[in-house]
Image: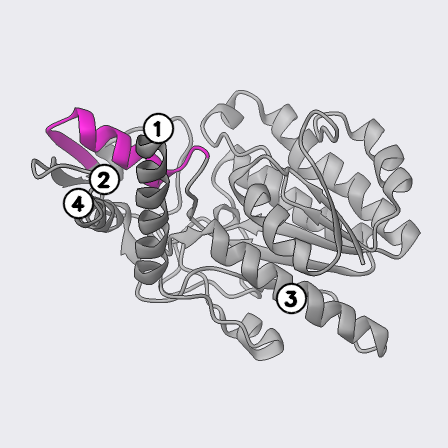
């Protein structure tokens, strides 16, 4: 099996480049070799590689900047996704694409299912929703995996921001009225490999059906403030922070104004993924503990070298 991975240098792409290697040959391309800001060049990339599976982990993710760069966000997250979808249909490749909780407005009481009607409240969410629509309209063999609050050992994410800020500041003000499921990129990558293996098996016997699946950490929903408390405490236990921990003050969204609005509720129901593929992602607390333990090992290795 040959797999084309876009966005290979991102936090999810880096994890995927390792986990997908168990499935076959992975051609992992970063922006320098596969730039989704230039959709006209994508067909040539796909046709040169001739993949059996296209895994699109590339995206425009600068949520606030997207309010001023909406055209670029739509080019990367929708127009180029459509180009990949067309190439997947032409070649018969399976297309794996990632969606986001930000396609919802956050007003629902309870977890969002795959059948709930999206209603994004920012440019980033609109661009990602347009990408989902492009996949559904233009690809024949596809799976859309919708996730939330992604973090990793590498890259720019909430966990690394909290750790950095906790070392420099005595107090942190963290939003407490937005809730969701923090999801480790490693878990998404592992689950994606399982999904691809199962999907290719389904295709081989003519039983494959395209679809949209939520793929987020399990466990009770948590606020950004609650997530930050867990990060700081686990970091202290792992020796990533000293004994003098910052005070974390819960605040309202209105007290921390950002350019782009965020959904208050980002919970995603995972029953459909479990029913078809037998996948239930670990609880977010367990995944966070493993991620921070890995950060600790990496820090120790650097210190020893």
Residue visible at 19% across and 47% down?
229
Residue, far top: 68
Q: Is residue 16 left or right of residue 204?
A: left
Q: In this view, does 104 lie to the left or right of 209?
A: left
Distance between the Cα atoms at labels 2 and 4?
A: 6 Å
Q: Mark 3 points at which residue?
A: 195
Q: Position of residue 240 (x, y in %)?
A: 23, 39
Q: Nearer the viewer, mark 1 or mark 4?
A: 4
Q: Are marks 3 and 2 in contact (CB under 8 Å)?
A: no
Q: In this view, does 44 lie to the left or right of 304?
A: right
Distance between the Cα atoms at labels 4 and 3?
A: 35 Å
The residue tagged with tag 4: helix, strand or loop?
A: helix
Distance between the Cα atoms at labels 2 and 1?
A: 29 Å
Q: Name the residue under label 2.
A: 240
Q: Do the residues labelled 2 and 4 touch (CB within 8 Å)?
A: yes
Q: In this view, does 191 lie above or below 179?
A: below
In the rendered image, the quadrant that contains the C terminus is top left
Q: Mark 1 points at which residue?
A: 258
Q: In this view, does 191 lie above or below 175?
A: below
| Magenta span of residues | 155-173
Q: Position of residue 121 (x, y in %)?
A: 47, 40
The residue tagged with tag 3: helix, strand or loop?
A: helix
Q: Where is residue 140 in the image (x, y as percent from the top left)?
A: 83, 59
Q: Name the residue under label 4.
A: 236
Q: Earlier in the sequence, mark 3 or mark 2?
A: 3
């Amino acid at each position: 099996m040959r797999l084309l991975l876009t966005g290979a240098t991102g936090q999810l792409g880096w994890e995927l480049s390792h986990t997908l290697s168990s499935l076959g040959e992975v051609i992992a391309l970063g922006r320098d070799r596969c730039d989704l800001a230039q959709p006209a060049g994508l067909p040539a990339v796909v046709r040169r590689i001739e993949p059996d599976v296209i895994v699109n982990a590339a995206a425009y993710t600068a949520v606030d900047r997207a309010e001023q760069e909406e055209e670029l966000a739509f080019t990367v997250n929708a127009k180029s996704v459509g180009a990949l979808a067309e190439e997947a249909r032409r070649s018969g490749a399976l297309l794996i694409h990632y969606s986001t909780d930000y396609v919802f407005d956050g007003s629902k009481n309870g977890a969002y299912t795959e059948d709930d009607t999206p209603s994004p409240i920012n440019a980033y969410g609109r661009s990602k929703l347009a990408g989902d629509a492009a996949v559904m309209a233009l690809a024949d063999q596809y799976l859309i995996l919708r996730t939330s609050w992604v973090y990793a050992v590498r890259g720019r994410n909430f966990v690394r921001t909290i750790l950095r800020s906790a070392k420099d500041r005595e107090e942190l003000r963290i939003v407490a009225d937005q809730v969701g499921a923090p999801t480790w990129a490693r878990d998404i990558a592992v689950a994606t490999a399982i999904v691809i293996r199962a999907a290719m098996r389904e295709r081989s016997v003519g039983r494959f059906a395209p679809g949209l699946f939520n793929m987020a950490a399990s466990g009770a929903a948590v606020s950004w403030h609650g997530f930050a408390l867990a990060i700081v405490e686990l970091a202290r236990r792992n020796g990533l922070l000293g004994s003098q921990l910052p005070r974390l003050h819960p605040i309202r969204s209105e007290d921390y104004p950002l350019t782009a609005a965020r959904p208050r509720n980002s919970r995603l129901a995972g029953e459909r993924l479990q029913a078809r593929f037998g996948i239930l992602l670990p609880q977010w607390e367990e995944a966070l503990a493993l991620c921070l333990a890995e950060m600790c090992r990496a820090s120790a290795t650097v210190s020893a070298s």
